Image (cartoon, rainbow, N blue to C red):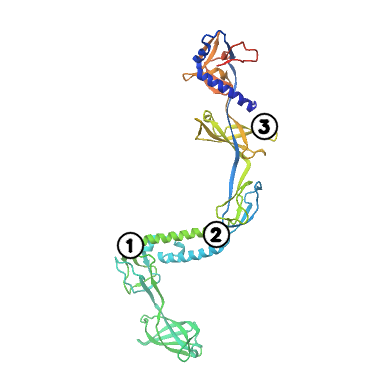
Amino acid sequence: MQGFWAKWKRWVIVAVVAVAVVGLGYWGIKAVLGGDSKEKLVMVVKPVTRGDIEVTVWGWGNLEASREDEAISGASGVVKEVFFEIGDQVAEGQPLAFVDAGSIEIDIRRKEITLDLLRLELAKAFGVTPEEVANVDPETALIIKAPISGRIEEFTAQVGAVVPSPVCKIVDNSTLESTFLLPKSLFDKVAVGQKASFACDRFDGFADGTVTKADPTPIAGEQSFFYEVQVQLKNPGLLRVGDKGFMIIKTPDMDVQQKVEITGYAAEESVTTPFTGKVKEIFVKQGAEIKEGEPILQLEAGDALLKAMEKQLEYKQAVLELDELRSQLGNVNILSPIDGVVMSKNITKGQNIAKGTVAAKVSDFTEMDLLLNVDEMDIAKLSEGQVAMLEFWGPEGRQEIEGIVSKVGVAGEVREGMSSFNVIVHVVNPGFLRPGMWASAEVFVAKKEDVLLCPVEAVYKEDDKWMVDVKDGDQRKPVEVEIGAMNYMYAEIISGLSEGQEVVVAMSKTEPEEGNELPYVPY
């Protein structure tokens, strides 16, 4: 292949000639030859030959690394150590800097506690397990359910009215409690787990029980100290809160007897809802027995539903915030994203940075891209995968390297009325290429073998037809031709000419000497 720069200079000359020819056409030439000039012009001719033609497109531009990435901080904090400088060769995953995340561990613990409390609150409001709160339908919060089994008490809700708070109380009257005080002489004989019996004043018989609490903390009385004891009793069905009678605790030494009162239920719970609204439907009555999980009432959709949805979104947001904190804790090292060379350094030791700060830019030079500017007249000839020959200034002067067209621009940039398009040529770096280097490229578009070739300076266009002037004796004869491939030297002739025909390429004022066709009038 001829030196590319020699080709380029010749192409500029031929392009000027071609523009003049297309502009003048056949009648333009006649005008040049007309007038009162008595000096005879001699036709400069060249033969139509048969051979090979290669079509190329030329462009120029600058190199950039084909692979480039940023090393980004995954945590906020103070830069404690920096392990790189511009120009360093680094490997993917290599630590470039260390960030002290400070109080992030404390922040994580705080967020975990907040999330646990919110999870329990939603589980209670939605009537589901804590693990289900993120995915449960918020409409389930409109149905208020019993948290435990028992009897409905203090229930005053009405359909159409705003739900009261608390909604009601549920008591489990299968187990009652009696809390009472004993003097030290009797308390010392009592222990948790001892069996007990309660004889009610209202009816005959005993209710069995167990000591569940024996608090050694003294409580001051009028003349001495007393100690609190609690007994849980199984309700045979007739006992109720407020009943009085004798409690008998069976100890190893003796039966401890004390006058007591039933003070409460072993299990009772107030039913509340975090979402206010009007009652749509009621499923129970005052005093009714209900099982855990059964519905008590339903709220109307509206503000209650919106608040339930808002609360669920608040929970999901808290989950994301916790994940974010944990992610930062695991990303205190800033790592190189790829193998390559450090091109920029944007952090210093002691600097306070935010998550997402770009610490460095790393470029991989092993493969590079040449960004070409290609003229709008040539862009249609290019496609991905075409071979290109690139010329650079290397250690040995101008050096040629083969590349491949990897991308052809779809939109041009207009400059001074002409559009140029960006084309990317991918090349493997032989070792001396660097980002920003200038280079030219010749892209090989097509090659045809054993075809008729006409000198390109003989071809001109007239009325949208390709024409060639052939020598006919001492006259010129315009002939319409069909053109195929064309480069800076030849045009492929598909029809209109035959091999050996002489075509006019210029008009000279003197007979050209052998090997010299100048001076001549461009044609």
Residue 466 seen by the camera: no
Question: Contact, CB < 8 Å: mark 3 with mark 2?
Answer: no
Indicate which disc residue 326 carries: 2
Q: Quadrant of the C terminus?
A: top right
Which residue is outermost to the right? 396
Q: Position of residue 190 (x, y in %)?
A: 49, 86
Task: Name the residue beneath numbered marker 1.
Answer: 300
N-term mark: 1 or 3: 1
Q: Quadrant of residue 180?
A: bottom left
Which of the two labelled residues, at mark 1 and mark 2, occupies the earlier sequence position? 1
Picture disc at residue 398: 3
Q: Residue at x 59, y 18 (%)?
A: 50
Q: Residue furthest front?
A: 36
Which of the pair 441/497 is nearer the observer? 441
- Residue type (three-letter) at the residue carrying disc 3: Arg
Q: Amino acid at mark 1?
A: Glu
Disc number lying in front (1 or 3) = 3
Measured Cα–Cα span from mark 1 to mark 3: 83 Å
- Amino acid under disc 2: Arg
Which residue appears at 30% of the width and 68% of the height? Answer: 158
Mark 3 Cα shell of 10 Å, populated few (<14), some (14-19), many (≥20)? few
Lateral position of residue 194 relative to residue 13, left or right: left
Question: Image check: 77 left or right of 235?
Answer: right
Q: Earlier in the sequence, mark 3 or mark 2?
A: 2
Could you classify mark 2 by the number of other residues whose Cα lies within 10 Å: few (under 14), some (14-19), or many (20 or more)?
Answer: some
Q: Is residue 97 left or right of residue 417?
A: right
